[in-house]
Amino acid sequence: MEQSMVTYEEYLQAAGNEVFRQLAEDPYLVIELPPDVAEFMGAFEEKALSCVDF
C-alpha cells in the first residue's frame, strides 16, 4: 500500500478548510488554532494604533 506525503502547504490548506466548514455549521463556535494555521488564514496582530496614540 502506497502512502502519499502531505506537504506543509497542503496541511495548512486542509486545516483552514476544516475550520471554515465547522464555522459554517456553527458561527458561534470557538476554535483554538495553532499559530501557523491562524497566520495562514490571515490572522495578525494589529499594530497600527495603541492606547498611547490617543
Image (cartoon, rainbow, N blue to C red):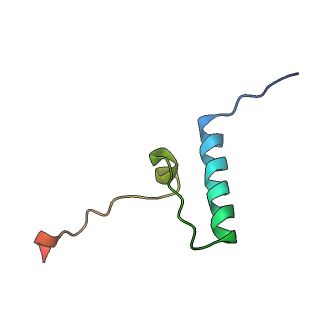
Image quarter (top left, top right, bottom left or bottom right) of the C terminus: bottom left
Residue depicted at 54% across the width and 59% down the height: 31
Question: Is residue 27 toward the left or the right of residue 52 in the image?
Answer: right
Counting labels gives 0
Which residue is situated farthest in the top direction here?
1
Q: Residue at x 62, y 49 (%)?
A: 15
Residue 48 lies left or right of residue 35; in this view the side is left
State the residue in front, 21 or 28.
28
- Against 47, residue 1 (above or below) is above
Compared to 5, does 44 lie above or below? below
Q: Residue at x 48, y 58 (%)?
A: 42
Which residue is most to the bottom? Answer: 54
- Give residue 11's position: percent from left, percent from top: 63, 41
Q: In the picture shown, does residue 51 fall above or below 15?
A: below
Residue 6: image location, x then y, percent: 69, 33
- Residue at coordinates 66% horizontally, 41% vertically from top-left? 10
Q: Quadrant of the N terminus?
A: top right
Residue 9, image x, y percentages:
60, 41
Q: Picture quarter containing residue 49?
A: bottom left
